Image (spheres, grey):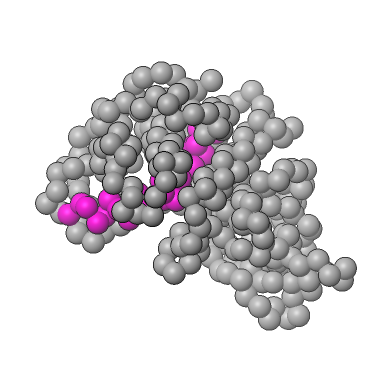
Amino acid sequence: MTKSFQEKLGQGGYGSVYKGQLTDGQLVAVKLLAETHGDGEDFINEVASISRTSHVNIVTLVGFCIEGEKRALVYEFMPHGSLDKHLDGDCAHLDWNTLFLIAKGIARGLEYLHRGCNTRIVHFDIKPHNILLDKESVPKISDFGLAKLCKRKESIVSVMGARGTAGYMAPEVFFRSLGGASHKSDVYSYGMMVLEMTGVWKRSNANMTSTNDEYFPEWIHKQVEAAGNLENHGVTTAKEKELVRKMMTVSMWCIQSDPSARPSISKVVEMLEGSFESLQVWPRHFRSSHTRPAQGASPLATQSSTSERLLTMQTAGEDFSS
């Protein structure tokens, strides 16, 4: 179906992805896994679980191939590729309304995984690279290689070691003293991803130097509170300004250091669909940090490199965890 793997779509730690076509003409993306462990039982269980999902914002698993130690997953083909390619460089052309709809679609997909399936699925690797866009830029969550299944009534998920991608990984995933990994860990990753979608990290990097005392979350707070000169970053209308400020506000609630202070993903959907005026500003109480980003360093890289950056805020305010 790939014609001897002629067209490569991407590559990562998981393996490589190739474009293919089924005999009926349907285009697919074939992901060859780089390595396997055990007798393949976990692979089959994962495929069986993911194949039961059905949601407009979850990528469709068409099938799988297994031969000896070789494993391949066959997904529906997404012509616009992954979201990360649309956020950087010359390809960053998505308008603010489209970005907002993408953020809302991802939240709905996560809500389905957390509440709509027979079994709650915690993804553990929400990031732009794992969000695929169809021809109409409808987002679909993909790559369930790190996902964990849990009973509907369970909140804490048992994981061995760090699970996720640095910069998007919730602090409790590797600092067990914060309460343990749960579906709230996906909420944290979602918040970091949406902040990246707004371009906050790029703008903060341009305004923060190694001698600047303004801490990253404090800077964002000021941007939301005072509309943050958004006109200088492609935000030209009152509607766009409201959408961007709403995305920033929801994101900052999502990346609270205490999982219990974060909203559930259902609450996130409600916040995004409601008016901006109805949103409460997150607590303006941050943990002190003596670590500032080096000049020219990515705030994402800096935030992922130290525990102080990950533990950004004290918990306070209304409980959005229900």
Q: 158 or 109, which lies in front?
A: 109
Q: Is residue 253 left or right of residue 293?
A: right
Magenta stretch: residue 239 in it?
A: no
Q: Is residue 277 left or right of residue 50?
A: left
Q: 217 or 47, which lies in front?
A: 217
Residue lying furthest front in this view?
Answer: 237
Q: 255 or 146, which lies in front?
A: 255
On the question of residue 174 being in view, the answer is: no
**What residue is at 53 percent from the left and 65 percent from the top?**
12
Q: Position of residue 48 (x, y in %)?
A: 77, 47
In the picture shown, does residue 157 fall above or below 39?
A: above
On the question of residue 278 being in view, the answer is: yes
Q: Quadrant of residue 318?
A: top left
Task: Specify start and end residues of the magenta stretch as a single range.
Answer: 182-209
**What residue is at 20 percent from the left and 52 percent from the top?**
208
**What residue is at 44 percent from the left and 69 percent from the top?**
90
Q: Provide the major secondary structure of the magenta segment.
A: helix
In the picture shown, does residue 137 fall above or below 312?
A: below
Q: Position of residue 181 (x, y in %)?
A: 49, 35
Q: 191 or 238, which lies in front?
A: 238
Q: Position of residue 296 (x, y in %)?
A: 23, 61
Q: Position of residue 80 (x, y in %)?
A: 61, 63
